[in-house]
Image (cartoon, helix red, strand yellow):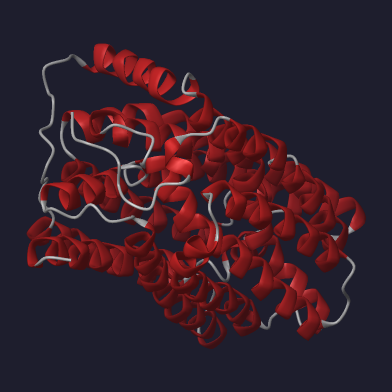
Amino acid sequence: MNPAARKIQRIYLTLMLGNTFAASFIWGINTLFLLDAGLSNLEAFAANAFFTAGMVLFEIPTGVVADGWGRRTSYLLGTATLAGTTYLYYLLWQWKAPFWSWAVVSVLLGLGFTFFSGAVEAWLVDALFVAGYHTGMEAVFGRGQMVAGFAMLVGSTAGGAIAQATSLGVPFLVRVGVLVAMFAVAFLLMHDVGFTPDRSSRPLQAIRAVLSASIDDGLKNPPVRYIMLAAPFSAGVGFYVFYALQPYLLELVGDPHAYSVAGLAAAFVAGSQMVGGWVAPSVRRMVRKRTSVLIISSSLGALILVGLGFTRVFWVALSLLALWALVSATGTPIRQAYLNDMIASKQRATVLSFDSLMGSSGGIVVQPLAGRAADIYGYAFSLAFSGVIELFAVPFLLASRRRRSQADRATATTDTPV
């Protein structure tokens, strides 16, 4: 990697570190926070579903911002929006606000994340290409995942410990502070490279153009389409499992106020994410096709969740959680590289945002559905039920494999800016 590409990678890793560090302060205690605010399991996961609904609703409009005003602008808007809505979450918790207010703010929280989805990844790939880096992207995405895993390990552990020592609301305030700091960092370091924003279209025209490009370069491209159609099942399950594990593990421990245990669970996921990012390039070299890794990862993840649903021993459950996270994390950089190798530069942020939209749409359905199952049958049953849902992603991954895309076997970036 030449010096210019190395500089781009350093900025990308800095953004990943700061963003994940800020977000992870609440990941270990978010469900407990919602339940402490007086929401039921159904309402808590419905609030999460409204968050993902916000991501679905705003993915296309914010994709216009990324492609029309620049990926840097999109990132800065996302940081500011997340800081504001996180503070509103804290206020709702203090006020013991009714469910409808949680639903509204959750949608706005989803808006904040849509400014990030696609924009940062597209910024990285385009900038590296211009810098002369044409090697397979698994290594870079893997490093990004390792950095994010480290940030999540520190942030989630600290968030659980801070909540234990103070209250469930304090980690949300810490998150606001870190996001404000990241706004300043991105303002100074992040500049659009290898991409020229197109501001010629009016907003509604631009939204129609983005939606059309998402369909033409995404859903109408068979191998990309099937990867996207698998996303609602895998992403929807991922959303639910991560947040359901917090009260589930406390239930196994027998102490509903052991918030540090919830942080420990998130830390285990973070550690697995780091290992997964580290081994992903090696795993990719061991197999001929990227889809082989994706199919195995999805299948094993589903089986682990089913096993987790039948576990009543805390340390066994925590070990299975770590294994589930490791399997998922190993496949993530490979999926990113596979998808990026099938997308042209001009539509990259658009299609990646649409892919995120597809994954978020699964969260709208899976989270309240599984949350209701937890209310009726318990968390263990809901986790096993989630594993069954995850299996529905496998046929779509097989369909993408059968399209024999060149990107399935690629070991270097095949895209050229257009």
Query: Residue 84 versus residue 10: which sits nearer the camera?
Result: 10
Measured along the vertical axis of the image, is residue 181 above or below residue 202? below
Is residue 60 visible in the rendered structure shown here? yes
The picture places residue 389, in percent across and down from the top left corner, at 77, 44
Is residue 175 visible in the rendered structure shown here? no
Measured along the vertical axis of the image, is residue 318 above or below residue 335? below
Q: Which residue sits at x=47%, y=78%?
A: 153
The picture places residue 114, in percent across and down from the top left corner, at 38, 41
Query: Residue 47 versus residue 307: which sits nearer the camera?
Result: 307
Quarter that holds the N terminus? bottom left
The picture places residue 287, in percent across and down from the top left corner, at 55, 58
The picture places residue 102, in percent across and down from the top left corner, at 55, 46
Q: Determine whether, in the image, residue 376 is placed left or right of residue 277.
A: right
Quarter that holds the C terminus? top left
Q: Determine whether, in the image, residue 25 is placed left or right of residue 249.
A: left
Q: Which residue sits at x=70%, y=61%?
A: 244
Q: Determine whether, in the image, residue 258 is placed left or right of residue 385.
A: left
